[in-house]
Image: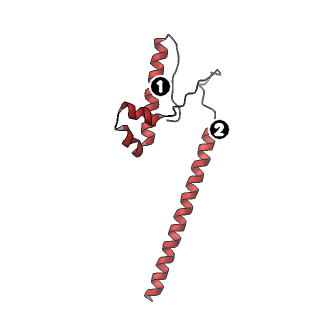
């Protein structure tokens, strides 16, 4: 009787691991499809405006964060989206300040952060 219970326990464990693996794979596919969908979407433009838009992507947000504060390195491992959000917010503020100093009337916004 105990051999049968042991075999059933092993079978349940194997099925649980297999199901977890399948769910993990499905999650990866969903994330890939979402990234593809978001990547294909045009940037939202303000209502009533149909003009050119400048898009800036920061390719090294973590390096910039670590340069600003050394604690950003370990924080990036724990909360990478938070670090990206902070870097993009600061960059947008700096760009807006520089444009204003040069007499440019511009609206600087961040999307997707």
Q: Is the image coloured rainbow, by chain, by secondary structure, or in one colour?
A: secondary structure
Q: Is residue 110 above or below residue 18?
A: above
* Numbered disc 1: secondary structure: helix
* Residue 17 percent across, percent down from the top left: 51, 67
Find the residue positioned furthest to the top: 103
Q: Is residue 110 above or below residue 15?
A: above
Observer-nearest residue: 72 or 44?
72
Q: Is residue 104 left or right of residue 2?
A: right
Residue neighbourhood size for the residue with mark 2, other residues' Cα within 10 Å, grouped as few (<14), some (14–19), many (≥20)? few
**Residue 40 numbered mark, or none:** 2
Label 1 neighbour load within 10 Å: few <14, some 14-19, many 20+: some
User: Could you tell me which residue is drawn at 59 percent across and 48 percent down?
Assistant: 32
The residues bearing labels 1 and 2 have C-alpha atoms spaced at a distance of 23 Å
Relative to 70, 100 lies left or right: right
Tag 1–tag 2 contact (CB < 8 Å): no
Quadrant location of the N terminus? bottom left
Residue 3 on image: x %, y %: 46, 87
In what element is the residue under mark 2?
Answer: helix
Q: Which mark is residue 43?
A: none
**Residue 22 percent across, percent down from the top left:** 57, 62
Q: Which mark is residue 92?
A: 1
Q: Earlier in the sequence, mark 1 or mark 2?
A: 2
Q: Position of residue 2 (x, y in %)?
A: 43, 87
Q: Residue at x 62, y 43 (%)?
A: 36
- All told, the count of numbered labels is 2
Name above or below for residue 34 compared with residue 50.
Answer: below
């Amino acid at each position: 009787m105990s051999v049968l219970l042991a075999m059933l326990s092993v079978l349940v464990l194997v099925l649980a691991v297999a199901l977890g693996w399948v769910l993990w794979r499905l999650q990866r596919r969903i994330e890939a499809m979402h990234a593809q969908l978001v990547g294909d979407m045009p940037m939202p433009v303000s209502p009533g405006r149909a003009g050119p838009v400048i898009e800036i992507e920061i390719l090294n947000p973590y390096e910039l964060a670590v340069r600003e504060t050394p604690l950003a390195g370990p924080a990036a491992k724990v909360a990478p989206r938070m670090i990206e959000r902070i870097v993009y917010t600061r960059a947008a503020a700096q760009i807006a300040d520089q444009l204003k100093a040069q007499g440019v009337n511009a609206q600087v916004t961040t999307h997707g952060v």
